[in-house]
Every structure is written in structure tokens, then in C-alpha cells.
Amino acid sequence: RRSRRRGGGDHPCKALARGGLAGRERRSEPRGGVEGARMTFPLSIDDFKKFVLLNINNRLGHDVRAKVLPVLEGYGSYEGLCQKLKTDIHQGIDPDEVGARQEQYGRNYIEQKPLTPFWKFCWDALQDPTLIFLSCASVVSIIIGTVFEPIECLGWLDGLAIMVAVVVVVLVGAIQESSKEKQFRALTDKASDDLVNVIRGGVQRQVSNRDVVVGDVLVLSTGDIITADGLVFERNTLKIFEGALTGESHAISKGPFEFKDRGHFEVPADLDLQQMNVPGASPEERRQTYEPTPDKTPLVFKGTEVQDGEGKMLVIAVGTSTYEQILLGDKGDDDEEDEGSGRSILQVKLDSMTILITKVGAFFGIGIVIILFIRFGILFANTECCKEQWNNAVHNSQWIGFIITGITIFVVAVPEGLPLAVTIALAFSVRKMMTDQNMVKTSSACETMGSATTICSDKTGTLTTSMMTVMQSWVAGSKCEPKDVGSKYSDSVKATISHAMTINTSEKTDIVAKTNKKIVNGHEVEEPVIDPNSGKHMIAYSGNATECAMIKFVNQLGGFDGNPGDPAMPYKAIRKAFPESAEGRAAITFSSKRKRMSTLVPWTGGGFRLFTKGASEMVMSLCTTYIDADGSTKPLDDATRKSLEEEVINEFASQGLRTISVAYRHFDATPAAPDGTLPEDAESDLTLACIVGIEDPLRPEVPDAVQTCRRAGIVVRMVTGDNLATAKAISRKAGILDPAKEASGEELAMTGEQFRTRVLSDQNSETPERCIIQSEMDSIWPKLRVLARSTPTDKLVLVTGIQKSRLVVDGYTRQVVAVTGDGTNDAPALKQADVGFAMYINGTQVAQQAADIVILDDNFQSIVAAVKWGRCVYDNICKFLQFQLAVNLSACFLAVIGASILTESPLNVIQLLWVNMIMDSFASLALATEDPRPDILTRRPYPRDQPLLSRRMLRFMLGHGAWQLVVLTVMIFGMGDVCQQGGTPDDCLPGTLHTNMFGEIRSGRPTEFDHHMMGLKVNCVPPFDPTDNSTYAFNASRTEGDGKVPLRPRDYCVKTVQAEQAPTQHYTIVFTAFVLLQLFNQINARKIHGESDVTDGVLSNRYFLAIMGVEAALQFAMVQIPGVNTAMGCAALDASQWVLCVLIGATSLPVNLAVNAVRPESLPTWTVAWQPGRRGSVP
């Protein structure tokens, strides 16, 4: 037997009720108006917060005695609390005191934050370090292009293009964030202004829940959603369902603490105790040391539901002071490496990469400017043609051109496309994730999920359905699946079971349609939630969860397949035939001592029938017969009893099921006493109708999803408030805990008590996540798969400890932790996690507000979809990055070689701008919108500290960059005949061919370079020198200059420079071939893991094909359309030249096979050692 001892007085606040000293003090307080506002209370908001947290973190009986009761007694127990709050449990507060109490303790209403203005999203997006740098580079480029270069040269376009890219990134990001905020607001915009019953001035009245204040006395009844935190300490029948807060799947009785005897733990009796970390203590000694959770606890929380009974509650916290809101407070200790950054894993890597690329670009840009100025000086020193003396009209534009060339190289190197690619990839994935039932609140969470290495999941409502259900049954002498009972047994057997289960349940227990309250056109409406799988209304339980499971089974027996709440449900017909108000009805209520309940009703065929249900071993001991398949009865002999205990009850219990026996007995006359009471001896000679195993079942999709996570290298850990036996049973069914590995010690299940004892240096700290003993944590978490009997603090500590750990596990030095949950208790861990997932249908608003992603269908498989899209984002960014860096490499080196050797870049500023657009804007659209590969969930997660560029990506970048550089160098220096210009820049003057190069076109290289390269004399008209008759002609009729006419016209050098800058087919072929090399290389860049078939899936990506088509069409227009090609510095090409360019561009495809043949490990060390933040090897 369990003895019950109360933690407080039997009659709290009696002194107040009798009008004692406390009552006199209360009457002496000034009332109402200005005087009432001067009321003061000795207990502060912080005092109550500490008291609530103390209760939450100490739930076992021995902890309550040691830590909670002393604090309660320090307040003067429940009577003292009433006195300190100047209230009366029977009279309530004076209505005139509401204002004063709101002033000290706050209102029970939390103002919804206004929608963030659009400009704020733009400003936040612009805080990206890369965008700040690009904006500065854009301004500098525009200033130089307009101030130091003629406007018609369009040098300012580079800067303008960068600025446009920045604006696009900012606008796209801001629009995306604004849209997500509005979506989430619509998702969670539920009415909360309900009426509640309070006692004020001795009168029960209804007030808005927003007007509830500390000190109020709430009157609670079945079905009420509690609107504040409070204490229940009068005798009552309240049972509160706290599943959303604690993870418990059954209702909790409320009232002053009632303790169990030491050693009485639930099934199995000592499993929880064996997990306690008490060195040298035997299970028996531990049983005498530790006490189970009390039968009753006084604390009631906002957001929980009254499942049964009635009672009064003293309000001690409202609004932002409630435990629900405490859970939504600031996250715990951030990772020391990420503290204050607010940047995602990929963003940090990209920032480092951007800075590095920018430094390299600046080095090349400054270097080429220095080289050009040195060469410029050497030409003047050697008095080369048009360098004999300084000419402002000619030489100012040249040295300014050198600076522009340097800036152009720098701009080409600047990765302004990276932010755009990230933004597009995230926007694309966020939209796709919405179709996969993931509503993303925080964009960075999308790509962070791609690196997730562990998922800490809640059990109730996340892995399970959060609805108790009959999972196993024994009927008429044999075990049977519940779904098969309806078709396997006779109507009389089914009728007996249905009546026994329905009549012996409270009519307050009901199955209804789940609804959501929303504000539509200013009015509150309730809409049923539709199950996305069946298309029917979602089921919701009202009342006792175990009894709901019983009547749901009755519906199953009756073959009901309609919507929940339908009057045609079979159990409703039985209730209508046997109402609770029927004359002659009697009952024996359930108690934890008896572990059963019974109901007697007048029977339709005459006489009376008693129905009993309860704990299997208790009810079966009262049975002498059992019902057979044909409806007859058979004796329940000892052999049958033993068989039932071993093969049914124990087997069900080993599966984590709660076993309940249902029995009945027929009486010719009522056994009830004249006063209507039913004696306990009526519960004898019963006939056993059935035995059922009940649990909160696993969601059907969970086992496959967990196995997918295992294959993807992600460890799933279950953290629950349920007991260890149930938690282990569920985790084994889900595939989280492997029994063989548990037996070998590779995997571990433990209780929150043991966990806290080992890993916390101070268990009473208000911030326990800052008191982690990391060495102990590191000895536990790699093996931990199940944490049972856990508090919200335990989950937060676990998540924080895993994040802080630098233990190398499976090659990862920093774990990326995702957390899933649906309850209020999950909020701290959801906020602390790298990625937090909350359920929408069965999740609380607190959890949804704390999460980064809301799962719209409450399907664990949707979390796997989030992993898939997270990895896809990372892959797509890497695809773009390897493509852009290959282009950067070849474009920069091409410009450097051209400027160093030819004193000019083979590609002019406008052409480089177009190349920049291809590798930035268009490439980001093409490559950032790729769908996930089928094998994406068979790869291990990307390590958090892995360099952004893998060896394969570096191989791609170096291989293709080198190939493009070789091809283009050969085209620049190996094509184009050296001759004097004929009628057009592309024709040779007949008889002047000096060197016949590849192709029948004239060289586009500078004439001075060609002549020096071929050892030819430069045909330069000498400048005028009065002492040198070779520089002038004599004209006697000319009086000016003594008749000496200079051979070099005044505008000779200007025209010479202009002639050199005329578009040529030679350089147009180089430009077109370069662009086509990039277009074909975009196809190669779609693969980043060394795949040989780069065309796989290309036809299914309409974005990619469309963008490739647009790029090719624009390139053709820029070369062939008159006027457009002039502006681009191009000359029209003929068909054969286009074929040549296409063939050269197509070489990227076979070259990719050769590049892939190179082993990534063979790359020299210097090719990988330069990456910032690199730790370990590059895969």
C-alpha cells in the first residue's frame, strides 16, 4: 500500500476564509483608484519565476522534499502565499485591485510584434560583409569610370553592374524574408481573447483571459485551456494534461504534494532506479534513497488543458512571466566561435572565401597597373613610336586606361555573384521546401540543415502521434490485431466489448475534429484541420486520453470511417442508450490505490450489468470466467491465468504498452445500496471481455525516416519526459536504439536524473547550460540515444553540450545539432539548436515561435526532406563557386597576360562585363536552381569546418582554368596574319603579308607588338624635327616654319590609337570562344563529386536549359547585330567562324573527362593549403 503525505496543510488559507489576521490586514489596504495603485506585494515576479523553475527541475519525490518544500515553507506554505498576495482562495481579490496588480506583475497579454517594415529587411540584408565590400567597389568603379575616362567609353558600366547585382540581392532577400514573416503570421494568427471564470469579491464571474491578474482565483473545469501559471492546493478532482509541456502522455492529478512510498517506481519497478548514478549502491538501497514522482503536484501551467475534474487555482504568473514565455527567452550559451556573428555555416565560409578572392584580385589588379606603368616608362625611354614626347591628347587616356584595366581585372575577380547565388539558391529551396511541407522561417536554417550531424527529437507528438491508441488486444482466448477484431469475432462479442468500454467512461471523454482558431475579416472562426494523407478532418481527443483510446477502438469495432465528431460514431449511439443520468446507474470511481473503476447500468434485456476496467493484474484477479469467440463464457482457470500473465500482459508490457483489462458481470437485481453507492464487493466473479495494450503510437513514417537519417550519417536521439521503459520501447520500434548495440555498450539509454548528476557542476543554477562538465558530457553524448524522464533543462543542456564538444566523432570535430519538438517544453532547445523544427498541427505556438522551420504536416519524413534541400543548397552553391572560380582564373590570367605582353587586354571592358554577367547573374540562376540528386541522402554530412572548396572542386577549377587559358593564349598569339591593314581592319593590304598565321583574318593584336614579335621595322611617321630633313617636306610657298611641312600630322598618334582600338574578327573569335567555353563548362559545373555523365538530368532542369539558351542568343546578338556589336567592340563573324567557336567551346566536355581522371589526392599541397579556416584534410 502507498501511504499519502501532504506537502502542505490540509486546509490552506483557512485563516483567510475565517477572516483572521491575514484577512484584517487585507481589509486595511487602501482600495481602488489612486490609493489602490499604491498596493505593494512582498513577492516579486522573479521570486515566482524561481519557484516555478525549481518545481520544473525537481520532479522526483526526493528532490521535491529536499529543494521545493523548504522554499514553499519559507513562503509560509500555501496560506503564506495567499497572505503575501493579499488574496483569499474563497473570496478572491477585490475587483478594484486589478490595476495595481497589473502594475506590479504585468498584464496577461503579450502584444503581437508589428510586421517588420520592408526597409528594415533591406537594411538587414545589406549588413552582409560581402555586400558592403561590393557596394564600396561599385562606387569606386563608377567614380573612376566617369571622372577619369570619357563617358562614351562606358567604363562606368562595371560599377553600375555591381551596384545592380547588390540591389537585386538585397531586394530578393528582403522580399523573401518579408514573405516568410507574413506566412508565419498567418499560420499562427489565432484568437486568444477567451472568457474565463474567476472569483472576485466573493462572486464568481467571467472576465477576459487578458484581464486575469496575479492573485486571481480561477475556477477550472473539464476542457478549459489554462491561461496563466498557478497553484492548486484545495481538495479537487482536477487532472491536467501537460503533454505539450513535459512530454507526459497521461493526465496529472493536481493538489498539494502527495508522495508515494520510497521504492515505488512504475513498470518495471526498478528500471529507472537502476539508471541512477550512485556508485556502490544496490537497486534495493537506491529504492530507499530515491522517491518516485509525487501522485499530486500543485503547480499548473499556462497552455495546459484540464482533462477532467473541477477545482480552483491561485494565479502566480501572467503574461511574459509565465513559464511558457520563460521558455521563449534568450537562447543559452552560444558557441564561442560563432558568438555574436549571427552567420550561418555556409555564410561564414563564403565570407572568408570572398575576402580571399578579393585580396587575390586586388593583387593582380595592382600588379598589372604597376607592370603597365613600367612598360609605359620604358617605351618613353626608348622613344618608341608616338612615345617621343608627352601628348596629353594621347597619353592621358592611355595611363587612365591602365588604371581602368587594373580595376577591370579586380572587378572580374570580385565575386559579386556569390551573394546572388546564395540568395537564389535559398529562395529556390525555400519555395520547394514549402511543397514538401516545410515552412522556413530562417533562410540560413535551410542550408545549415545540410550539415546536420545529429537530431535531438521529442517523443510525444513528434515521433509519436500524441494520441493514446489501442495497439494490441486479447479477445476471446487469443491475441488479435485491433484492426482485425471487427471482422474476426461475432457481433455479440463486439457488442459486449463496445458497451463495456463506452459505458464505463466519462461522457466528458469525446473524439472531436481538431480545429484552429483564426481571425477572418475581423471575426473569430474555427476551421477543422484537414489530414493531408486521408483528406478527412484530423482527430482530436477531449478528456481522458486512455478513455479516448477506448472509444476510438469502439469506433474501429463498429467499422466507422467518417469524420471525427460525427454523431454517427458507434460509441455515441451506446451513450445515447445508456445516459449518465439514467435511473439506477451507479459507479465506483478510479483511484491510484484500486487501479480500476466500475459502472453499473440497468440492462436492456433486464437486470443490471456492471462494467469494470483497470490495470490488467488487478481486474483479472477479480475474474472467474472469460468470454469465448461465440459469446459464451469459459472458466478462467489457473493455467489460463498464467498464460495470460506471461504471454499477454508481460509481452504487452515489454513492448512499452499500458495493459488494461475490461470485464463485466450481470446482476438480476441492483447491487447498489439504497443511497446509490456501489460496494466494492460487487467487483467479483467478473467475466473477462478483453485485454488491450495502449500506447501513444509511433508515427508510421518514422522508422523509414530514421533509417534514412542513419544512411545519411545523421544520428537521431530521443529526448522525452516519459518513463525509461516506454521511451526505450518506442525508440527500438523507431530504429533509434539498437538492442544489440545497447547490450554491447555502443548505444546508451539513460534518465534525466543520471544525466544531470553526471554532467552538471551545479544542478540548481538558473543557467545550467553554463555549468556543463564537458569531459563528462563527452563521455556520454556519443553513445546516448535515449534520454528519458528529462526536463526541458536536460534537453537544453544536451544540445548545448553537444554543440560545445570538440570530441572527434565519425570525423567531425563540431557537431551541427537539429532539434525537433512540438511542445512548450521544447522551446529552449529549439532556440539553442543550429536548426529548430516545430510541428504545426499538434505543436504549440511557443514551439513554433522558437523554431527555424515549421513542419506543416507534422511528418517526421518532412525533416528528412529538409536535410535533402539543405544539402542541395550547399551543393548548388559549390557548383556555382567552382564554375565562377574557373572563369575568374582564366579571365584574370588572360587579362594579365594580355596587358603584360600586349599592353592591352584582349577583352575590352564591355566584353569583360558580359563575361562577368555570365559567371555571376546567369550562372547563379542556372546552377543555383538544380534539384537534389537521388543519392544526396546516402552521403555523409559536410563537416562544419570543412573547407568550402573540396579537392574535386579545386581539380575542376585548376583543370578547366588551365585548359581555357591554353586555348585562348594559342588563339591570341597563334591566329591573325601580320600585315598592313587593307580596306577593313580584318583585311590585309595586298602585297603586305609578312607572316601567315592560322586563319585568313588579319591580326587584332597591337601593330607595334606584331612587328616587334616578327622582327619587322615599325612603319612610324617620325615626329617633326627642324634639324632632321627626314621628318619634314619643303614647301616654298608656305611661309610658316620656313616652308618646312611636318610629315607627321597633328592627329597622327590619336588616329593610330583609334585604329588599334577598332573591332576585329580575330579578337571577336577569341571573345566568342571564351564565352562558349564558359557556356559548355556550365554543364560540367553541375557535378561536384567527380561524376562522369555531366548531362545526367540536364533535360529535366528547364531553368538551366532556358538560361543556356538566353546566354547563347545574347552572345549571337552582340556579335552579329550591327550597332550592338560596335558597342560591344565586336565584328560580325561568318558561319565557319561560328562553327570554329562552338567546336572550341565544346572541348570543355571531353576535357572534363580528362580532368576527372586526375586523382584529387595527387594535387600538390599548395593547391589546398591556402583556404581560410582550414582544419584537417580536404575531402
Image: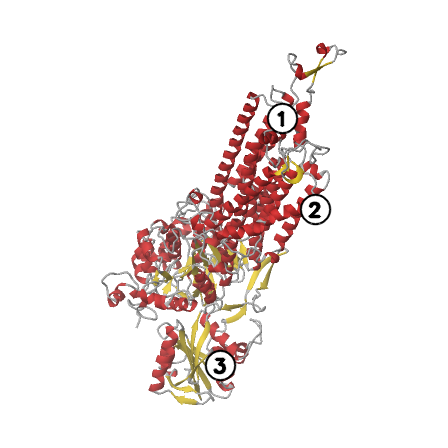
Q: Is residue 137 left or right of residue 763?
A: right
Which one is in front, 443 or 39? 443
* Crowding near the residue tagged with mark 1, few <14, some 14–19, many ≥20 C-alpha atoms within 10 Å: some
Quadrant of the drawing holding the N terminus: bottom left
Residue matched to label 1:
1018
Closer to the observer: label 1 or label 3?
Answer: 1
Q: Quick one: label 1 or label 3, which is nearer the N terminus?
A: 3
Q: Assess whether mark 2 and mark 1 are in contact (beta carbons under 8 angstroms).
A: no
Numbered label attached to residue 23? none
Query: Compared with residue 849, is residue 376 higher up or lower down, i.e. above or below?
Result: above
Q: Quick one: label 1 or label 2, which is nearer the N terminus?
A: 1
Residue type of the residue flagged with mark 3: Val
* Mark 1 residue element: loop
Residue 219 in view, yes or no: yes
Q: Quick one: label 3 or label 2, which is nearer the N terminus?
A: 3
Query: Compared with residue 738, is residue 828 higher up or lower down, i.e. above or below?
Result: above
Quarter of the image where one finds residue 283: bottom left
Numbered label attached to residue 1135? 2
* Mark 3 residue element: helix
Residue matched to label 3:
485
Q: CA distance from mark 1 to mark 3?
A: 104 Å
Closer to the observer: label 3 or label 2?
Answer: 2
Q: Is residue 519 left or right of residue 844?
A: right
Residue type of the residue flagged with mark 2: Ala
Q: Residue drawn at (23%, 63%), measured in percent from left and top? A: 281
Which x, y percent locates residue 237?
A: 42, 68
Q: CA distance from mark 1 to mark 2?
A: 34 Å
